[in-house]
């Protein structure tokens, strides 16, 4: 399944009442010989999180993420979400963040936007 996820260009997750986290890295999947390994989602250019009342974050582990082609992020009605990731996230192409249907020009710090626009 991971291979399939890596090929997605648009990701839309909505109406999942009990989802608390989208990406969970289990201990047995971690590479302990590479402690600073970055998880790369190479293809998504659009990510939409909508009506996820219990979602606390995209990923709550300490892994770093790179979404090199992501240019649009929409987070709508995710009232429990306080952070995108607990690790670092790199989104060099990110141009727009939409939070609760308000659009903002984006820099790279998604966590800052989420905290400031709750």
Image (tube, rainbow, N blue to C red):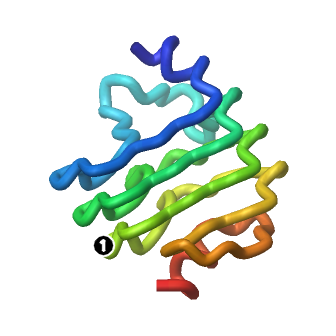
Q: Residue drawn 76% across and 49% down? A: 71
Q: How many marks?
A: 1
Quarter of the rendering containing residue 107? bottom right
30 w.r.t. 72: above or below: above
Q: Residue drawn 59% across and 34% down? A: 10
Q: Residue drawn 54% across and 85% down? A: 117
Q: Residue drawn 37% across and 69% down? A: 77
User: Which of 115/25 is in front?
Assistant: 115
Give the structural element (helix, strand or loop) at label 1: loop
73 w.r.t. 35: above or below: below
Residue 32 percent coordinates (x, y): 47, 30
User: Which of 79/15 is in front?
Assistant: 15
User: Which of 6/16 is in front?
Assistant: 16
Quarter of the rendering containing residue 102? bottom right
Residue identified by numbered label 1: 80
95 w.r.t. 4: above or below: below
Left or right: residue 5 compared with residue 24: right
Furthest-left residue in view? 18
Residue 75 percent coordinates (x, y): 49, 63
Residue 6 percent coordinates (x, y): 57, 21
Residue 25 percent coordinates (x, y): 37, 35
Left or right: residue 20 compared with residue 104: left
> Dot 1, how many residues are within 10 Å of its Cα: few (below 14), some (14-19), or many (20+)?
some
In what quadrant of the picture does the N terminus appear? Answer: top left
Furthest-front residue in view? 101
């Amino acid at each position: 399944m991971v291979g399939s996820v890596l090929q997605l260009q648009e990701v839309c997750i909505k109406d999942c009442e009990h989802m608390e986290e989208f990406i969970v890295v289990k201990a047995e999947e971690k590479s302990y010989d590479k402690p600073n390994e970055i998880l790369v989602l190479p293809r998504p250019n659009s990510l939409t999180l909508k009506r996820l009342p219990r979602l606390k974050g995209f990923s709550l582990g300490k892994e770093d993420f790179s979404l090199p082609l992501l240019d649009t992020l929409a987070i709508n009605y995710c009232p429990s979400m306080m952070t995108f990731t607990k690790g670092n996230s790199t989104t060099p192409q990110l141009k727009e963040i939409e939070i609760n249907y308000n659009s903002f020009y984006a820099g790279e710090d998604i966590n800052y936007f989420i905290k400031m626009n709750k």
